[in-house]
Amino acid sequence: MADHLFVYGTLRHDTGHPAAGLLERRARAVGFGLLRGRLYDLGAYPAAVRSAEPEHRVRGIVYRLEPGLCEVLLTDLDAYEGAEYRRELAAVRLESGETVSAWVYLYARPPPPGRVIAGGDYRRRDVRLPER
């Protein structure tokens, strides 16, 4: 089982969302990372989907999951994310250049026709309409 988790939305400690506290108490932040994907603004929260395009990146925070608490924490996070998201393993590149295998919650539906978050950073929402 992977011992890292990549978060890009409301679970980021810098969002001030109450759910982020759950993660802060049970895991240790390693640093910022990049996931190959696209980020969409769904209003109150974002949605990430995989992308094969190298320029499509989602910026988030990587946490190291504490042994013994990992399965319990992931079960709690699965419940928080609900059926809208699925937990998958993905390669995430850390700022150091190291790549780790991390759990990430990806949007379980087709990409929404809504707005793409340019730059892939939920905290710096430069939202633009999708290309037509």
Image (cartoon, grey):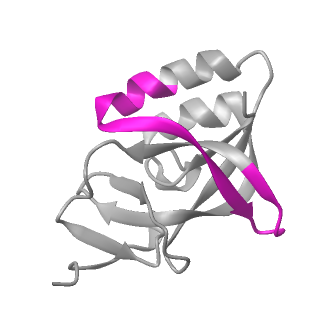
Q: Residue at x 47, y 49 (%)?
A: 16
Q: Residue at x 36, y 72 (%)?
A: 117
Q: Nearer the viewer, residue 88 or 28?
A: 88
Which of the 4 image quarters holds residue 102? top right
User: Magenta segment: does it hold 117?
Assistant: no
Magenta span: 77-100
Q: Where 41 sits versus 15, above or below?
A: below
Which quadrant of the figure contains the N terminus?
A: top right
In percent of width and height, residue 92 lies at: 67, 57
Q: Where 11 sits versus 131, above or below?
A: above
Q: Residue at x 34, y 28 (%)?
A: 82
In percent of width and height, residue 72 lies at: 61, 15
Q: Nearer the viewer, residue 14 or 41?
A: 41
Which of the 4 image quarters holds residue 46? bottom left
Which residue lies most toward the bottom here?
A: 132
Which quadrant of the figure contains the C terminus?
A: bottom left
Q: Nearer the viewer, residue 132 or 9?
A: 132
